[in-house]
Amino acid sequence: MIIDKSKISIRPEKATEYETVNELIYVAFSEQHGKETGIFMKNHFIEERKKKTFIPELSLVAVLEDNIIVGEVALHETDIVTENGKITQLVLSQSAVLPKYRMHGIMRMLVEHALNKAKEMGYGAVFLGGNPALYGRFGFEPSCKYGIYHKDREKWGDGGFMVCELIVGVLEGVKGITCYYGG
Ligand SMILES: CC(C)(COP(=O)(O)OP(=O)(O)OC[C@H]1O[C@@H](n2cnc3c(N)ncnc32)[C@H](O)[C@@H]1OP(=O)(O)O)[C@@H](O)C(=O)NCCC(=O)NCCS
């Protein structure tokens, strides 16, 4: 399939599109990681949308000219608990692209747009638990480098819990734990 990326727009999802996006997450994760993960990731995001950490401007969809949604990414707030109190930053909840639209740079469009928007909004760092081979391509690096660990450190391993500094130096001297369980 030929995809003209100039015809794809990235914008926040609308409340009327939640069901479509939920289904997209289910389809994308089921296809690559199995049905159970598909259900888990879909339900996880349904719950994230209900929390006060949810940020509509950072819950983005990739849309074709005919208004078909083919991909999504969502960032929401998370706290780093440090000796000197909590610091609020972001976590990338998940990113998903429908199977037939993959490997055309749609995830890259979504993630880069989300990181730029987050920086514009004043956030300094984005965490995630995930695949280093994938997220390393977007500027994420193991957060242990900064002395910031996930509460469930063993689950993610020191390579699998990552961070991307949006503002260089923002994590300097910040040591602590985040509680986000990742997807
Ligand atoms: C992962 C996923 C979102 C990628 O979407 P995509 O639109 O095909 O990705 P892109 O075409 O934008 O690729 C971006 C980069 O990641 C690489 N990439 C894509 N899928 C990858 C994978 N599974 N593992 C490692 N690298 C991958 C591409 O080669 C590309 O690299 P480059 O830009 O440095 O050349 C899609 O495969 C998907 O929905 N998977 C199921 C859900 C999932 O696993 N999400 C990620 C965890 S939250």
Image (cartoon, rainbow, N blue to C red):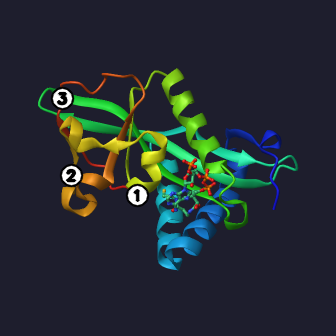
Residue at figure coordinates x 46%, y 21% from the top left: 122
- Above or below residue 180? Residue 88 is above
Q: Position of residue 166 (x, y in %)?
A: 42, 28
Placement of the N terminus among the 4 image quadrants: bottom right
Q: Are marks 2 and 3 in contact (CB under 8 Å)?
A: no
Report the amino acid beneath label 1.
Asn
Residue under pointer 3: 85
Q: Which circle marks residue 49 in the picture?
A: none
Q: Position of residue 86 (x, y in %)?
A: 23, 31
Q: Secondary structure at mark 3?
A: strand
- Above or below residue 14? Residue 47 is below
Report the amino acid beneath label 2.
Lys
Residue under pointer 2: 151
Residue at figure coordinates x 83%, y 49% from the top left: 67
- Does mark 1's beta carbon lie closer than 8 Å to ligand 1? yes
Tag count in the figure? 3
- Above or below residue 100? Residue 115 is above
Q: Secondary structure at mark 2?
A: loop
Q: Please tell me which of labels 1 and 3 falls first in the chain.
A: 3
Q: Position of residue 66 (x, y in %)?
A: 88, 50
* Pick the front one: 17 or 27: 27
